[in-house]
Every structure is written in structure tokens, then in C-alpha cells.
Image: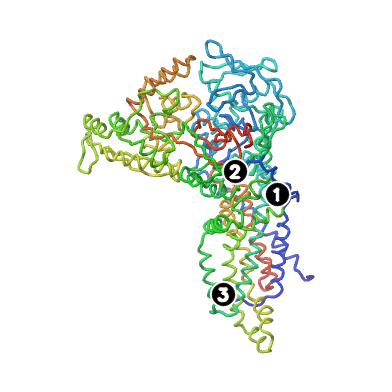
Amino acid sequence: MSVRGIRAAVSVTAAAVLAGAAACSNPDADDDSGASGGAGTAVVVGVASEPDTLSPLLGYGKDGNSKIFDGLLARNADLELRPALARALPEVTDDGTTYTYKLRDDVTFSDGEPFTAADVVFTYETILDPGTNNASKGDLAAVESVEADGDDTVVFHLKYPYAPFAERTVLPIAPEHVAGKGDVNTGAFNTEPVGTGPYVLDSWRKGEKLTFSANPGYWGGEPKVKKLTMAIIADDDVRATRLRSGDLDGAILPPNLAKTFAEDDDKQTLAATSADHRAVTLPTGNPVTGDVAIRRALDVAVDRDTMVDKLLEGRGKAAYGPVPTDSEWFAAGTERPYDPEEAERILDDAGWRVGDDGIREKDGQRASFTLYYPSGDKLRQEHALAFAGDAKKVGIEARVESGTWEVIEPRMAEDAVLAGGGNPADPDFDLYPMLYSELAGQGFNNMASYTNPDVDAALVEGRESGGKTERKRAYDRVQQELKDNPGYIFLTHIDHIYVLADTWRGLTTQIEPHEHGFGSGPWWNVESWQPAP
Amino acid sequence: MTGLPLAPMARMAGRRLLYAVPVLLAVTFGVFAIAAASPFDPVKAYAGTAGFSASQEALDQLRDSLGADDPFVTRWWDWLSAAVTGDLGQSTSMRQPVSDVIGERIGWTVLLCAVAFAVAVVGGTLLGVLAARRRGGMLDRAVTSAAYALEAAPPFWLGLLAVWLFALQLDALPAGGLTDTGTDVVTFGQVAEHVALPAAVLAVSQMPWFVLYVRQGVGDALDEDPVRGARARGLAGRTVLLGHALRSGLLPVLTLIGTRVPELITGALLIETVFSWPGIAAATVEAATSVDFPLLAALTVLATAAVLAGNLLSDLLYGLADPRVGFDG
């Protein structure tokens, strides 16, 4: 490069760059440094992900514990429903299609406006409106209409009797006078919410953190934790390091990292049991995974207890269905002990003969299928490899491959997927979408295209019959069918581990769903935490 | 500076502005086309984790409401006709108007980029001159090989390395964010402390280019006749280096400043993601993976405008510095 003849431009450049820098390096910050709340009243927790929106109308907090809002009902530590904005549990008519809620009359939103039945009607009607972009509106599919009867009574009319409906009414209530203004999908309410809940939002810097402060006028009493910060830290190691350095008071951690805090006297570890399962889908459309003998053989060939010990470091339970074994809804006697000899016997009897390469064959069909796991998910990868290892021992080949959901989704009807999910609130919430035959191929519902008329009938009976005994009997039948013809091989239920500074008392955890960390975790009821004496 | 040729400069800026219109049209069209061809499904992206349990009816309603089935040409035209009236549309991934998303974030990106760019230019010039002073010497060899090594290192890798070293091992600087986790208030001190690491990494990733160009330019200039003449006249080495060789050697750097803007933007994209910096680059990643057309298009326009402005700036400076080049471009 040859360069000639240059004069003053150098200084011009330098000046321009520096002037630009100086002008920009003047952040619009006020110099008020009165930062964090007083020691002992502020809590900073690290979680892995943040909500997309803070508007209940778009799905925020639909399973409760939303901090900023309250539902008509709430769940306690044992997941029992208790009244919140409603004065009592709903009155249900005998045919199970009308739910009547009496509302509290002493509740105001954090902007001082009173809470009334109109807000409840507004919330539910807006969610059900076709123009509202709420992906979870299917939760309310049973609702025919909602009406206010005066200021303090709300009546839900259902299209069909839906026994778990009350569980859906933990859904947070938005104020009509605020959320009704502006665009429901993109309006300011999404980022500047106003609710009746124990906390009000101070700020939300997306991808970084949300900060809340206690609502002094909360109808349930002002929380002792005055300031709550939820830091969004996706990386497990970074979260652990920041917990160790004191930057965080608590965090959700994988078992191996949680273990490194076991010796710390000033840290407490809480393990929440969950309905969060990992399972292999066995698509009906695949000639191998659709074969009942293959399914039943795989079901007893997998060594679930070893998976719990090795993959989860003991923090979990063997799973035989979406319903955890310690749930009151679990059908006793449907456990499947690890029995590879039994698996081989089932396969031999069904005519699957071991071929030259150790993989079984029947009528020219090799007992081989592809098993996908979502790339980057280490836990599912480990489950997939352990599953494939166990399957190999009885002569079935599962070729483990990874892919993004964009890759996996179009293949779900043909190939197996290491799936995860689980909602402990009601057996209907997992069993129906996973097993009901009509939902096959709809989004991520019934990923295995499971088709079993007996199961369909039992699922409908379970959701439409009101009495607990009948429901239990129906779900027992479903779980028994799942044992006789498993459309999914359930592997484990995973405990969620949280490590917290030892400065608060009486921390508890609920039985947690698959989605956890923000609404769940020991901070599910942070408004009731008491400082250590 | 009375002798500035303002009229030709303005004409050049005007020509470039006209030229920018078809470029922006083509670029936004391209963005819509690429986003439509990508495997990402806007509906699934919008639904997020709720999509895994969503009913088909809810997904269909979402698809309809988001207009996800419209052909991308229609969507581009709708966006364009709204955008010229000043309505940038609604961001589906952020659930906010696009103008709000950009307004909240652009200041932080400009701050990060400006600090990094200033450090890169100043630091690069300094090191380049030092290296050129004795080519082949110890310092030159150290600086040059470091520059080549850094040029090959991806910024996100440098970022992770810096987090590991300064935040995790030494605990000297915060690993990310705009302020400490426990505080909300954005103070000058907090921001200065938090911008240090990302800006330094971005600067270091940009610096090799400046170092190498300055070193080459100044080194060449040191061998040229006017410089040799100045030496022969007995001027001090320092005066020769800074007064003669540097001036001449900086000319390529002017071009470089313009051409580095795209690199700076892509660098910021990765750095903001690594350091959870609340700027627009982080929003770009989100917009792209969510197929958030309106936000993606607005951000692309911004980036394109920045690149075009950078080119214009370097051409103007070049024209000023070397009158033979003129303002005809």
C-alpha cells in the first residue's frame, strides 16, 4: 500500500472520534446512589429464564405465584387450593358446568383503584378473545362465558363439565382500567404491570433482571421481604459463582453444582419434588416403536433407578407415567421393575429374533429407530444415551441424534423424542394432552400419536366427572393401560434444587411443574418469608 | 478551518443519501426474505415455552393474529408503507412497540460502541506507531503477533475468556449487566464499572486492524523521501515520527474507520449477548430467532444506516485529507 500527501485530516479524525465518544459517554443517569434496600429485607435470587411478558392476559403467571398479581384462588405448599381474591372456594352446580366465586371487597390494585368483578370478567374475556396472542388460552377451553353478578360475584359457565376447572382460576387478574387501555398484545401493560399482588414491579431490564418492592397496601399484609430481585442468569456456572461471591442470596442449580455448597454453614439447600418428567415418545406411526411388544419390552428394559442415581445424583424418582409415584393420583401397582430378561422374553414371544449384528428383526424389519433430543440440553442427552444403552442390551437399537426443535418437530410422528413436561396440579393437565388420540400431531400435544379408545374414554370420564373417587378410578385405568401399552417410556421425575443463604426461616417448596424457577422455587411464597431470629 | 469545501461535501452527502434509498429497500426486502426462509416458526417462537402445551386452536389463532402465513412480500410492503409514515410497528418478541424497544436500548449500544471504538483507534494508533518505529524489533514482533492472534480470535470467545478471568477468577469487574444485581439505580460509577469489561473486549477485538494498518502506513512513510529529507535536515526523531511519518501513515486508517463499522456492529452483537448488556444488539439476536419481522427490519435499517454513514464519513475525511481524491464518489 502506498500512501502519500496527507495533512490536517489526522487531527480532524481524532477530534471527531473523541467528540463522539465524549458526547455518548454521558449516560442519562441520575446521581442518586441510594441503591439496595436495607440489609436483611432485600433478597436477590438467580434464575435461568425470564417471562416473555408480565401481562396475565398474555399468559404470565397462569399457574399462580405471579408476585405482582393474585388469582381468584391460590395454592398452598401442598398444592391445595385456597381462596385468594375470592372469599371462598367456588360453589359448583351439580352438573359441574357453573362455578360461582364470591369476591373479597377489601382489595385494591397497587394504583389505589378497587378490585371488582368487572376486572375478573375483563381478564378472562380478553384472554379468550381471538385477537389476544395468548398461547395458553387452551387452558380455558372449557369456558363458555364469564359474567359479573354485582361487584362481588363472578359466575363461570362451562361448555362441558370440567372437574379441574377451579385449578385454572389461580390465573392472575389484571385491572381493566389499566390493561384495558392500549393494545393488549404490545401495550405498556406488558412491561409496566399493575396488580393486586404482594409486590409491585420497580423495573425490568430484559435479559438482566426484574426488581420488585413490597406492596405496602397488600390485602394479605405487607411482606417482610421488602425488595426482591430476580436476576436472569442462563449459565449454571455463572449463577453458582455469583451465589458464592454473595452477589446472589439464592439460586436454582443443577445437583452437581448444588453439591459444592453442601459444606457451607451459611447456605441451605432445598430440593423440590416435581412432576417434571423425562420420557421417550414412541410414535405409533413408526413400525418399530408402534409395536406393542417393543414398547412393553423397552418399558421393563430401562433401568430407571440407575438413571436416578447416576444422571440425577439421587435427586429424583423413577417415573412410570406423568403422575409421580408419591402423588395421591398414582395408580398403585403400575410400577415396572427393571427386568431385562422379561424384556427379552416379550420380544422372543412376539417373534423379534436377534440378528447377526445383535439387533432383533421381525419380518425383515430391524428393531431400530431414531431418538432425538433437543440440542444443548445435557440432561436429556444423558437420558437419551442411557435409554439407548439399556435398549441395546435387549437387542433394540435407538440411534441417538440431536437437533433443534425446528428439526425435531416435523419428525415427531416418525421418530422418538426425549420429551419433558409435567404439571402436578391435576392429572388431567398432563394425561389428556399427552394421550388423547384426537390431539395427535397438534403442536406438541400427544407427541407419540398415542391411540387407545379405552384411554380416551377414561380421560373424558376423568375430566368430566366431578367426584374424586370416580376421577381416581378413571385415571387408574389410564395408568393401567399405559402399563399394558406404553406409548411413552417414562424414565424419571426430576427434583429441582435450590441453594439459598441461611437468613430466612420456614422456606418451603411446592411440588413443581416442568416450568420452574420463576414462579416456583422456594420463593413461590416469598411474601410470607420471615427473617431468621 | 475556513477553507472547508462545504458545497462539494454537501453534494456528496446528498448523492449518498439518494443512493441509500435503494440500498435500504433492498436490504429490508432481503431481511424479510431471509427471515421467511429461515426454519424458525414465528408462532412457536412467540409462544415460547407455553407453545409446548398450547392447544392447536390457540396456535392457529396466534398464527392468524401474527399474520405468520402472509407471504413475506406482503409483510414487507405493509411494514414499509407504515414505516415511511413513522410507524415502525409492534415487536412481537418484546411485546412492545418497536420504537420503544429501540429508544430504550440504543443509548447503551452507542455508549458501548463509542467507548470501544475510541479505545481501539487511540490504542491501535499508539501501538502501531511504536511498532513501526523499529520494524522487526522486539516490540514490533510482540505487537504484530499479538495483533494477528487477536484478529483470529472471535469476539464472543474473548468475551467469555474475559468473564472467566476478570469476573470469576479475579473478581475485579462485574460479569455482566448494567448495574450490580442488587441495585436498580443507574449511576455513572455503576455504568462505568460495568461498561469497562465489554468495551475493553470489543476494543481489543477491533484493535488489531488499526495496529496493523498504522504500523504499515507509518513504516512505509518512514522510508519515503520527505521523511528521509526531514531526517537529513537534522530534525529530532520524535518530530519526524509524529510530525511527518504519522500524518502520512494515518491516511489508510481513515478508510478503515468507515469500513470497520460493520465489524463493530457484529462485534457488539456478540459482546452484548455475552455480557447481558441491555443494548439493541442483544435485541437483534432475539428478533432474529423469533422471526420478529418489524423489529428485525428496523434494526437492520439502523445497522445499514450506520454502515453507510461510516462510509460517507471516511470518504469525506479522505477527500479533506487528500484533495486529489475529491468529493466525486
Which residue appears farthest toward the front when viewing the image? A533
Point out which mark residue A517 bears. none
Point out which mark residue B186 bears. 1
**In the picture provided, is A340 more to the left or to the right than B51?**
left
- Residue that carries the numbered disc 3 in the rendered image: A1
Look at the image and tell me whether residue B299 can be seen.
Answer: yes
Type of the residue with mark 2: Asp
Residue B228 screen position, x and y as percent = 63, 86
Give the chain of mark 3. A
Measure how far apart labels 3 and 2 are at the Cα level: 58 Å
Type of the residue with mark 3: Met
Q: Are marks 3 and 2 on the same chain?
A: yes
Residue A285 screen position, x and y as percent = 34, 32
Residue A409 screen position, x and y as percent = 43, 38
Q: Are marks 2 and 1 on the same chain?
A: no
Measure how far apart labels 1 and 3 are at the Cα level: 47 Å
Q: Nearer the viewer, mark 1 or mark 3?
A: 1
Give the chain of mark 1. B
Instruction: Give residue A154's quadrant in the image.
Output: top right
Residue at screen point 73% across, 50% down: A29
Does residue A408 lie above or below A62 as drawn? below
- The foreground one among A94 and A338 is A338
Measure how far apart labels 2 and 1 are at the Cα level: 21 Å
Q: Are marks 1 and 3 on the same chain?
A: no
User: Alpha-carbon neighbours of circle 1 within 10 Å: few (<14), some, or many (≥20)?
Assistant: some
